[in-house]
Amino acid sequence: MPGNTEPKSAEPVIAEANRAVRQRFAFDDAQDLKDARRGFMGTASANLIRSPDGRTVWDLDAYGFLDQECPETANPSLWRQSRLAADHGLFEVVEGIYQVRGFDLSNMTLVEGERGVFVIDPLLCAETAAAALALYRGHRGDRPVTGVLYTHSHADHFGGVRGVVPDKETARGLPVLAPEGFLDHAVSENVYAGTAMNRRATYMYGAALPKGERGQIGTGLGQTISTGAVGLIPPTLYIARTGQTETIDGIRMVFQLTPGTEAPAELNIHFPDHAALCMAENATHNLHNLLTLRGAQVRDPRNWARYLTESIGLFVDGSDVAFASHHWPVWGRERVLTYLSEQRDLYAYLHDQTLRMLNQGLTAPEVAEVIEMPPALERAWHTHGYYGSVSHNTKAVYQRYLGWFDGNPARLWQHPPVEAARRYVEYMGGADEVLRRARQCYADGDFRWVVQVVDHVVFADPDNASARELQADALEQLGYGSENGTWRNFFLTGALELRNGPVGTPTSTVASDLLSALTLEQLVDSLAIRVDGPRCWETEIAVRWNLKSADPLTLQLRNGVLTQVTGTSPAAADPDVEIALDEEALRAVLVGAIAPDELAERAGVKVTGDLGKLTELLGFLTDPDPDFAIVTP
C-alpha cells in the first residue's frame, strides 16, 4: 500500500475550475434556501440516532461543516445542494401535512387524519424512522399511526417501516398502501442482484468516506444512507390505476400510477382537501438517474416525461404546493407548473437528443461528450446533475435501445480487464514508462486521462504501489471537481480503497423481512442464481416437495440449471427424494435455517427416498461476495 493514505489538497487546475463554477451560475438566487427552511418547526435534541446495540446509524450534526464557505476541494454547486439537503428537522408543508427531512437519505411525510397520522415513505431503517416519528409527535402530539404508504419500490422509502409500526399487533388491520407491482420489484431488486448493488452502493453513497471537505459531502439526492435495520411490512392495499381514490383516516387521496419512471412501481398522490401534490421521486431538485451507478434496470425517460405531462394535466390546477420524497417543496401554482414542466423537458430532451445522435451513428461515449442542455434548463438549479448526470444518463438511453455493443466489431470480443491491461502496459513500454508519462499528465492537470491510463497499470500489477498512489491521487482530484454527488463519492471511495484496501459493504438491504416477502417462486429463483454451474454439469437431481396446502413443487438440477416445476406437469422429473412438509418448513430449508439431515427428525415431515440428494443439491450453491474488488482486479 502507498505510504500516504490521507486525502490531499486540490490541484490548481481543479481549484480554478471550481472557482469558475461560481461565475457560471446564479449563486445569489436564494429561493431554494427560503423554500428549504420554510415551515421549520424544530429538530431533535440528540444528535445521534443509535441502534439497539448502541451503534450510531445517523448523525444529525455530521454535515455541520457545510455552513462554511465552499473550499477548493468541492464543486460549489454540489456544496450548495448538499447544504440545502442537510437541513434537518420537522417542517410544515401545509396545515395537516408535515415532513421530517435530513434524518435519512429520504423524507418522511406525515398527514394528519381524523384519528391519527398517516405515514408516507418511512425512510430506510427502523431507527431513523422511529426518531422522525418521535420528532413529529413531540410537536404535534402522540397521534397513533393509522396507515402507511410506500410511494415506490426503493428501500429508502419502505425499509424503516418497523420504526413506525414496531410490532405485529400494531400492524394488524393497519392499511399499508403501495403501487401495483411494488412487492415483486422491492424484493427482487434487493435480493437477486442485491449483493452487487450494495457493494457498488458503498461507492455511490460514499458510506465509508469521512464526512468533510475532502470526503463525503452528500449524494445530491440527500446526504447519505443510514445504516440501521431494514424491514418490510407487505402492502394490504394496492393502487392499480390512475384516478383511483382512497380515503384513509378521513384523508382523501387521488393517485396517479407512474410505472417505469424513477422506479418500476411508483405513484404520485394528490390531496384535494389540502391542494397539495406529492410527486414521490418523479420530480426532485436534481436530474435523477436513468441508470444508477450502483446498478438497476434502465429507466424509461420517454415514459417519465409523459407521466410528468399527465401530472400537470391532472393536478396542477388543484395544487398550491408540490413536495417529494426527497428535498424541499415548491409553493405557488405558477411555480409548480414551471417546476414540473422543466423536469418533464429535462427527461424528454435527454431521450430525444440521444436517439437523434445514435441514429446519426454516434456511440454512447460520443453522445455523452457532445450533448449540450438547453440554456433555460441549465439556468434552473433543480435540473442540475447532482445525482444522475447528463453523461451517464445519455449512456443509459443508448443502453436501453441498443445495449452494450456499439456496433464496431473491433469491440465485439475484447480481452477482459486484467489480460487487456497486461498487454496495454507491455505495448506502452512497461509500467515505469506509463507512470512517467502519467505523472506528467497529472502535473498538466489531465486527471481524466491519468485515471484511464493508470487503471491499466493497476490491473496489470495490483501490487504496484506507485501506480495505486498515482491512481488514487488522480481519482481524488476528479472527485473534488465533480458537481455530481455520486460521481464524487465514486472517485473518492476508489481513492480510499486504493490507499487503504477494501472497505466492504457498510449497508445491506438484503434483510430478513425482504427474504420472507419473496414468493416461493422468487425464493427458488434466488437459489438458482447461486448454483455453481460448471461443478454440476454432469449431475442430475430431482427433489419433490409435497406441500400440505399447495401443489407439489419439484426442484430439478440438470445441465447446471436449477429448475422449478409446480404440480404434476410432464416437465417434472421423477424425484430422487420426496419430502412432505408445510411451506414454512420448506422456506426454512431453502434459506438454510434447517439442515437437510434434520428433516427426517422434524415433526410433521415425511421423507421418502434418498435425503442425501437434497444435501448434494444444496452443496452446489455458492455464497455471494459482498466485498468484491472494484478498483483492483
Image (cartoon, rainbow, N blue to C red):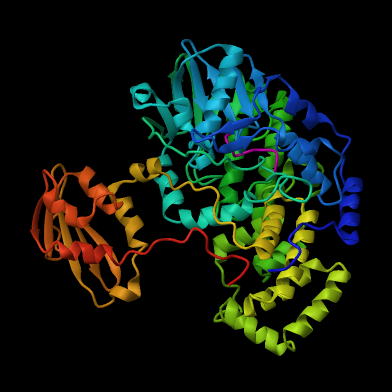
- In the image, 277 versus 549, the foreground residue is 549
- In the image, 432 versus 630, the foreground residue is 432
The x and y percentages for residue 194 are 47, 53
Our reading of the magenta stretch's main secondary structure is: loop
Is 96 left, or right, of 69 in this rendering?
left
- In the image, 497 versus 275, the foreground residue is 497
Magenta stretch: includes residue 284: yes
Location of residue 244 with respect to 524 vertically, above or below: above
Magenta stretch: includes residue 113: no
Location of residue 435 with respect to 17 vertically, above or below: below
Q: Is residue 133 visible?
A: yes
**Which quadrant of the structure image shows residue 137?**
top right
Residue drawn at 71 percent across, 36 percent down: 85
Is 306 left, or right, of 622 in this rendering?
right
Span of residues in magenta: 280-286
- Quadrant including the C terminus: bottom right
Residue drawn at 20 percent across, 62 percent down: 614
Is 461 left, or right, of 269 in this rendering?
right
Residue drawn at 15 percent across, 42 percent down: 549
- Quadrant including the N terminus: bottom right
- In the image, 339 versus 495, the foreground residue is 495
The x and y percentages for residue 632 are 61, 70
The x and y percentages for residue 499 are 69, 63
The x and y percentages for residue 433 are 78, 85
Residue drawn at 13 percent across, 44 percent down: 548
Numbered circles on residues, count = 0
Location of residue 531 with respect to 586 vertically, above or below: below
Q: Is residue 291 visible?
A: no
